[in-house]
Image (cartoon, helix red, strand yellow):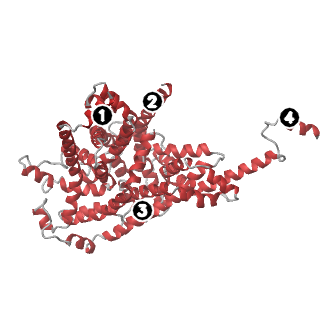
Amino acid sequence: MTATVADVRRRPSTRRITARAVLYALLIVLALIVVLPLVWMVLTSFKTDADAIRHPYSLPSPFSLDAYRNLASGQQPILRWLWNSFSAAAIQTILILVTASMGAYALARMEFAGKKVVFGLIISTLLVPPVVFLIPNYLIVQNLGWLDTILAITVPGAAGAFGIFFLRQFFVGLPLEIEEAARIDGAGDFRIFVQIVLPLARPALATLAVLSFLNNWNDFLWPVYVLLSPEHMTLQPGLSMLQGAYRTHFAIVMAGAVIASVPVLAVFAVAQRQIVDSVTGAAVKG
Amino acid sequence: MTDSVTAVSASPRRTSAGGSGPRAGTTARRRRRTLTAYLFLAPFLVLFIGFVLAPAVYGLWISFTDWSPFRDVQHFIGLQNYADLFTPGSTTSGDFWSSMRATAIFVVASVPFLVVVPLLVAVLLNQKLRAASTFRTIFFAPYVLGVAVVGLIWGYVLDTQSGILNHLLHAVGIRGDIPWTVDVPWAWVSLVGVTVWWTSGLNTVIFLAGLKGINSELYEAASLDGAGRFRSFTNVTLPGLRPVMLFITTTTVLASANMFGQSYLLTTGGPGNDTRTVIMYIADQGLSQNNMAPAAAMSYVLFAFLAVVSIVNFRLQRERVEKRRTR
């Protein structure tokens, strides 16, 4: 009985082959819909303005670096924005890694008065939509004199509950034995944390670093309102200025889009496993 | 003296043991543990109190005042800002509710596509393909781009005069003058389409993980019972995905209700204010027009609406857990 079922399965019927072909065809069409706008962005960025308007969907001819040259020497300091985006994302990521890992370790491993209250407060803010913090945080940042500085786009955003929540889950899952052995050997809390727990948590820290970096790099609403002068802008608000400044210069605007997306696509290419696993983790566990 | 000692030892459960005996040691140690824990938590708590708790309270307080950057002293005006929002004809209520309406239209129009398209793609990807992981990577990739990049690319694809999409439609003989970003309902089609293109990858990988969690024996049993592909999809796949479906629907509703960048970049809220979402309106009123107090009140009204979504989700999830326990 089981043998016959397996037999039927193994025989490659024509119906099965057609089904496979249709399946692949569907997936390829979908993949093209996803990829073509990106390909078009890259191709257009290597065109001259005239070529971009006259031949919107052909290969660049002549192949031209004019758009990038114009951007680099133009009115809009796009290389400055690139640097600002990179340093803001890096600083915020480090801030999150340091504060969230220390806090998460306390919440995962230590018993102390008020623990439930602290943890409950942190978790409950995950439910509050970010717009609630928009206006008061703007006023706070203004009072601190941080408007139009890198502090405005790094410090407030590091206070989110996600990082500490994410790392706490990871720390809770670590085996206790190693830490206990170290304690018997006379190591203090801080040494155990730095020399034993953090190295064990490297994969979780890497994932959080990637997510934090992408998040800050792509943040749009907040920098649009708290960054004012062109030289302090990051890429995201800068790009929307670029669109206004070069209304009909397709190639230049697409070159700006390429410059802003290459770093994140590179991070994604390297760390896609961590990114995908972390976004699916929360959903499937529940 | 001896009496008191026996009294203490006779009731070992008493908590206040004074300053002597082994209990004092544990209290001191407990205090030290608490101190250590708060030292570990301190850097995060400083940020958390400063930029999460304080603004949450501060924003609520502002919403009860006539706060204005041009005024030296603010007055407590109670629920006036909220009452204004619910009074037809006040300066804020008309625009606020039309932005809420725009947000509701976007939620209703986008969520079905943002759930169904990823579900179908995930089902396709789950068919034991050799290139499945390559396709998964491709489908997820747009999600890591920022909305500014997405806005730039699609701004030019969808441009009425010189956009590539109208160019293509004209070339294949359909009309080539569709006002993709400057007239409704086309603007909604564009906003939903762009959002589907940008964020579907997220829901796809979540669905895919959910599909991998369904016991394959259930499919074998279904096929032995003579169920075809469609029957096993409705009778095995969909019930198996229910928890994931609930999670995705809730997070997608919340994400769509918080839409900002797509409208800001592609339609600038137009035509008129037809596609101006509530987030756009709050940010504009609070940060560009200096109407901070009404804007703060609006953000709390939106919070109340979204809290209902979260509570319904929480109820449904708890029901599910209880059912699983009784099973």
Neighbour tally class for label 3: few under 14, some 14-19, many 20 plus, Cα within 10 Å: many
- Which of discs 4 and 1 lies nearer the camera? The answer is 1
* Nearer to us in this view, B207 or A254: B207
The part of the image, by quadrant, that contains residue A269 is bottom left
Amino acid type indicated by mark 4: Ala
What residue is at 49 percent from the left and 28 percent from the top?
B322
Label 1 crowd bin: few (<14), some (14–19), many (20+), radius 10 Å: few
* Residue B233 seen from this side: no
Q: Amino acid at mark 2?
A: Arg
Residue bearing the label numbered 1: A6
- Asked if both marks, 3 and 1, belong to the same chain, the answer given is yes
Q: Residue at x 33, y 31 (%)?
A: B220
Parent chain of label 1: A
Q: CA distance from mark 4 to mark 3?
A: 62 Å
Distance, label 2 to label 1, CA atoms, is 37 Å
Question: Is label 2 on the same chain as label 1?
Answer: no
Distance between mark 3 and mark 2 Cα atoms: 39 Å
Q: Which residue is mark 2?
A: B320
Amino acid type, residue under disc 1 in the picture: Ala
